[in-house]
Every structure is written in structure tokens, then in C-alpha cells.
Amino acid sequence: MAVIERLRRLTPESKISGAIVAAAVVFTLVALQPMLLVADTLPAGGDMGAHVWGPAFLRDHLLSEGRLSGWAPDWYAGFPAYHFYMVIPSLAIVALDLLLPYGVAFKLVTVSGLLALPVAAWAFGRLARLPFPGPPLLAVGAVGFVFDRSFTIYGGNAASTLAGEFAFSISLALAVLFLGLVLRGLETGRLRVAAAITLALCALCHIIPAMFAIAGATLALALRMDRGRLRWLASAGVVGGLLTSFWTVPFILRRAYLNDMGWEKLTTYWESLLPGRLGASLTRAFGGEATATIAGDITWVAVLAVVGLGTSIIFRRRLGMFLGLLSLLFAVAFVLVPQGRLWNARLLPFWYLCLYLLAAIAVAEFARSAAVLLSERADEPRRAALRGVPVAATLVALVAIGLPLRTLPFGSVEADGSYSWLSLSTADRSFIPDWARWNYSGYERKDAYPEFRAVVDTMDDVGERLGCGRAMWEYETARLDRYGTPMALMLLPQFTDGCIGSMEGLFFEASTTTPYHFLNQSELSASPSRAQRDLPYGPLDVERGVEHLQLLGVRYYMAFSPEAVAQAQTVSELTEVASVEGWHVYEVADTELVAPLDAEPVVLEGVAKGGEEWLDVAVDWYMDPAAQDVFLAADGPSSWARMPPEGRPEEEPVAPVEVSDINAGTDSISFRVDRPGTPVLVKTSYFPNWQASGADGPWRVAPNLMVVVPTTNEVELRYGTTPIDVMGWALSLLGMAGLAGLVVKGPVALSDRRRRTVETDGTTPALDLDRLDEPEGDGMPDRQDETAQPVSAGAGPGGRSEDGAKSSS
């Protein structure tokens, strides 16, 4: 009954807002193939088809040991799982998996950010006190952004999400909500707890939208700077940052062990900032040549955004001016960010989103102006227009977006391939529904699934017969994509219960073994991807590639192309052990995970232990067969020789040693030596968390492996916890204490706090986060409101004093 009573008390504006936001969410969901979302299949497509490995590994191996990050042997000869990749979306999948099939849980989480963005945009407008019909139209603007086709991998929109960037879209929705909380908090002194938690979740979902959130919050403070507001934002920001420390502190302090894929900076500035006719025209106007071939065209969005900014300046709408400055900030950053680890294209989604929101504000101001112009009295705007225009605008926008999506009710495809709805027709067709259908139908519904399953089952059988080990599979986009994604075989460890590892994995930046995998791929594939830039790739050379597989401890090689198979048949270190569906599986000789060294390693001096300096030297060593008699080390005992990177090491023979009883677990490796004191090579990727018992070390050696010097006959290496990890968790606990402190302290007192029944700029009070059922007014004064008096400066909503108010910091 209480719910019914609340609904009865809602104003027409609130009901219209609710209907528009609901329509935006439902419209978005329909385009994402909702029936396939709930089908019990494993999602495929692009990076998403490989992302399914992560939450399952988290569930089966890490959480059972009380960890949110740890070692995964499944990809790249091992890598630190969730050390450099955000864990919250995977935790959400694992939690939902308790109630739903794993594939369904995964798919629902992947679309959650897209469905949440219109709601977040509406809340952003409400929290920022944008008058009706601004907030619901911001939700519609967010839908336009979601289905923008001008970018497909940068993050935030549906195309990027379907390509695998679903963590980005979740984080972006949280960033928009956070900015709304900041704008309200800087006005009222409240909502610090909500802002801190939202910022933490935003960063733990994806670090790049967190940059957008922090930049926007800093800009909002700069526009209204004083001591009280600085204290509000600093306290909320510090507590939010501390909450993330369990992940961000190790991320930052271990960033030398991140791999840089070398994404090339975009320099087609006009066409990137303004895809379509406007960007091409500006490129030519400034003497350039329009070269970009982009499906989307945001010319009209850009024009409306300019109108939205102009009307915001005229009517002194703080939110519109804030969005204008924020969009300008990211446009400038896109141009000025140098070539480096942060790819400048990653900043474009924030620019685009601001344009769509400004365009929505333009439509809202048109509705408000029409309500005044159609009225006989300026002080009594025509409410029918104020309420009707946003409804009409929403319908027009959703039809315009829906026509190329071909998802409108009662629409039909004509014989010539065009799409008709009522009297409208278009030959334009968005790829997004097709991408969603491909992804969410799952691996199991692909025509080539029987072949894929046969390959996986064959490798599982090989592992049972001959022993578990890593596999290097030949790459070719066209052949592999038939399985659901070119990355399908990254799931070998998932389908073989960890027995068969895949040398290639999805988290390219999370392992510094990644460059050497792609060098191997180029030697062992007729059509390699060569995904990482600036590496000395060579042609197909299976014999040389096998030498590299032996060095990295890769036990199996899988090939299918006639060229690769023909070369493989001539390599004596390869023994064919299985064949299936055109694939030939070879066992590689001499790939034990622990092996004695013939010579003592040499420590490099004057070279950083990680990053580009180490990569350059290690790659040169890796590609020079004559240099590999002596391993190059990042550090080691004082007895080992030292040399500069340009030197040539002298070979210092060591006493022979026999290695036996090698056992490899998920995060441990143990073995036995017949004599201590001789260096031993461990063919697993190095990371500082590895700790040895019964040996000195481990030390990093080229390319990215480990060497230990046994001090006893029994040696064990285990991936453990370091002081950096402990510090991160300690700071997160401090953040929890800080959160409790914010609750106890309550709101921050602001000198010019505004708590008025009717705002001086004509807006009505927007919703507090804890009062989302508060009716939404139209921002226009009723005649009985003309004498309304402001609440006293020390009182909260409803006239309660600050001390007695029900508040949320």
C-alpha cells in the first residue's frame, strides 16, 4: 500500500521521467538480443569470448584460497591474474553464478553497464538540479551514445562492450553517477559516503573511466572552490582512493611488469573528434585529406551540443557549462596526450558522451522555451507543451536510433534489404544487433562448434595420455573466428580443467612474456596476428619457433596450414601425437619446466629491471641464437659476472646437475636436484611475488623466466604475498575506517549552502540519493509558489535543523 500511495503522489513530470527512463532501458535491452542473454550458452565474440575464462578461474582457484588476485598458469607461461586487471565485474559474475548458469550470469553482467548508463545519466541530471525535462532527456542522450557506431573498441558504447570492453561500460555508468554526487555534494555538503563508494567501485571496474570521474570532480571543484568544498571532495576522494588500495597500490608499484602493446596514437584529430561529414569537412578546410572510414556520423549531435552549450550559457545552466568545459578538457587531452602507454583514443568516449548529453540539454531547453512561447502569460508556461515535447522528442530519438538497429515494433525488412517502419524506410543497417546475436548465441550455437569441441576434446585426451602442458596453436583469423572468436583456443585450460595451457591469452598487458609469444606466433603461423607493435617479426620458420618453444617450456604445438604442417614434418624435435579436423598436434622434445644451466647467468648493469629498457635487451637476446648459451639476468648473487647491455657475456661453465621430480601446481613449482649450488632455470614467467624455499632467488632472466640457486636438494617456488600487497590491504582497511569516519562526521558545512524550495535560477530541488521517490517538478513556479520563502540557512529539507536532519554524507 505504501508503494501505491507513493505512486499516487508522483507529479506528472515524475511519471513522464520514469516512463522515458524505462523506455530508454527497455530500448537498449531489446537491441542486445534479450532472449539470447538468458540462453544457457557460453558467450563468444571478440575479446568477450576469451573473457569467460577469468571469472571461472577466480571462482575455482583464487576465491577458494581467500584471494582476489594470484597466479594463473593458464596463459603466457603463467601471469599474475587480476593484478593488472579489474576484479569487480568478475566478482559480480561469480556472485550471479550462484543463482544462474555461468554463461547467463556472464552475459547479464556484460550488458549491465549499457543498461545502467541511461539511469545514471538521469540521476546525474537530477543530482545536478537540471530542471525538467532535462534529466529524462539525458537518459535518451545516453542511449544515443550507447548505439553510436563511430567507434568500436575505445570503450563505453555497445560496440565496444560487445568487443569485450564491458568492464569499461560498467565503470563509465558509475563515473557519471559519481559526477552527479559530486555536483550535489559540492552544493549541500552531503553524500560523501555515497561518492567515496561510487568512486571506488568505478576505479575497481576500470581505471580509465575513473580518470574521467576524477577530472570531472576536479573541474567541478575548480568552478566553485572554497575551503568547505575542498574538504568535501578531498575527504571523499581520499577515502574512495584508499578503498581501492588493495588493487591500485600493487598495480602502481608493479607497473614496470606491465606489457605495452604499443597502441599507435590517433592523429586524425578532426575526423576522430567529429566522425562523419563535419569532421571530414574540417579536415579538408585545414588543408588535410579526409581518410577515416567510420560508420557513424555525429554531425547533428555536435550541432545540437553547440546549441545546448549556448543555451546553458544564456540561461546560466551550470550543468551545461560544466559539460562543455569537461568535453573541451578531453578534446584537448586527446590531441595533446603523447604516444605512450595511455592510448589517446581511450579518451574519446568521454568527449562523445559529453556531446550527447549537451545535445539532450539543447532539446530540453527547446521544450522549456516552447512552453513559455505557447503560453499567453510568461509566468504561466503551458505545461502541456513542457510535458509533451520531451515525450515527442524521445519518440523521435528512439525511432531515429532504432531504424538502423531494425528493432522497432512492427518494422519489416523489404525484398531489397531495406527496413521499413510505418511510412519510414532506410537502407542503413547497424552491425550492433548482429554482433550481439553472434556473441550471445554462444559458442555452442556456432556451425563450427562440433569442430571446436573435437579439437578441445582431442587436446584433453592428449593431456591424459602424455601429460599436461602448455600448447602453442597456429593463428589465422578466418579459421579460428568460425569457432566464435579468433581467441577461442585461449579457453583450452578452461575446457581441460587446467591440463592444457594456452600460450596466448587475453590479458596482453598483464604479462611481460606476451612479446615473446607474438614473436613465436610469427614463426609458427602462416598468417600471424603480430598484435604487438615494434617487434622484430620474422617469417614462418617452424624450426626456429620450436627452439623458442623449448626455451619457454611449451610442450605441444598445434598447426593446420599446409605451410606450417609441411615444415613441422621436417623438424626432428616434433613428434605428431594426434590429428583432428585438419589440426596436427605435435609434442615438442626437451620442454621440461625446470632445467639445469650450462653456464652461469650474467647480470646486466645500467638496465631497469622492467619496462622498455629490459624489453629491448631481452628481445635482442631472444632473437639471437648464438647469445642464448648465457642467460641475461636482471639481478643475482654477487658472484655472478656483471656487464653493460652492449657487452658480450663470457661463458662461465657450471657444475652439472640433475633435476627430477618436477611438480607444477596452480601457484607452485617443486623439484629435486642431486646437488645444490648450481643455477637452475625455471621456465615460468617471472613476477616479484614468486618466493623460493630451499634455494636462493628467484631472479629474473631473459626473456622473462626465473633462475634459482638450490641450497638444498628439495626446492619449492610458491607465488606468495609481498609487503606491497600487505600495504595495499592495510590502506584499504584504513579506507574502511575513513568511510566510518565520514558517516560519523556527517555533512560538511558550506558557507553559501543553498536549500531553497524554489531555486533562484528557476529549477526545483532535485533528488537526494536516499529519496529517489521524491516527486520531480517541472522547474516552473506555480502561482501559489510565488510567495514561497526559502528555508532557513541552517535547516535541511522539511525545515529540520542540520543537527536533526536525516542526512547522508
Image: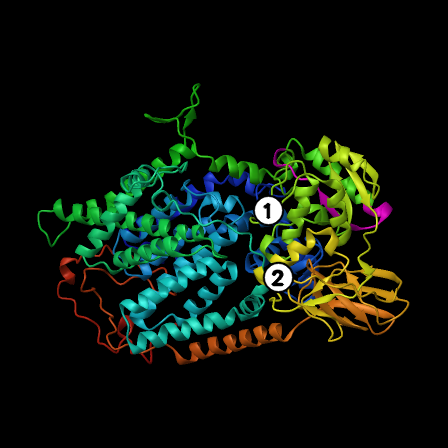
| Residue 481 drawn above or below residue 180 | above
| Residue 116 drawn above or below residue 83 | above
Question: Quarter holding the N terminus?
Answer: bottom left
Instruction: For marks 2 and 1, give the one nearer the viewer.
Output: 2
Tag 1: amino acid: Val
Task: Kindly indicate whether the residue at mark 1 contacts the one at mark 2 (C-beta within 8 angstroms).
Answer: no
Tag 2: amino acid: Trp
What secondary structure is marked by label 2? Answer: helix
Question: Quarter holding the C terminus?
Answer: bottom left
Determine the residue positioned at 37% across, 72% down: 233
On residue 614, the disc is 2
Q: Residues within 10 Å of mark 1 (few under 14, many from 20)?
A: many
What secondary structure is marked by label 1? Answer: helix
Q: Earlier in the sequence, mark 2 or mark 1?
A: 1
Task: Specify whether residue 555 is in view.
Answer: yes
Q: x, y (%) of residue 537?
A: 63, 45
Q: x, y (%) of residue 792?
A: 21, 76
| Residue 253 drawn above or below residue 784 | below
Task: Specify whether residue 395 is in view.
Answer: no
Residue bearing the label numbered 1:
104
Query: How far apart, in angstroms, are the residues tagged by discs 2 and 1?
Result: 43 Å
- How many marks do you count on the picture? 2
How is the model colour-coded?
Answer: rainbow
Q: Which residues are magenta?
A: 463-478
- Does the magenta portion include 769? no
Residue 447 placement, left or right of 344: right
Residue 240 placement, left or right of 665: left
Q: x, y (%) of residue 231?
A: 35, 77
> Please, which residue is most extreme toward the right here?
674
Residue 186 placement, left or right of 733: left
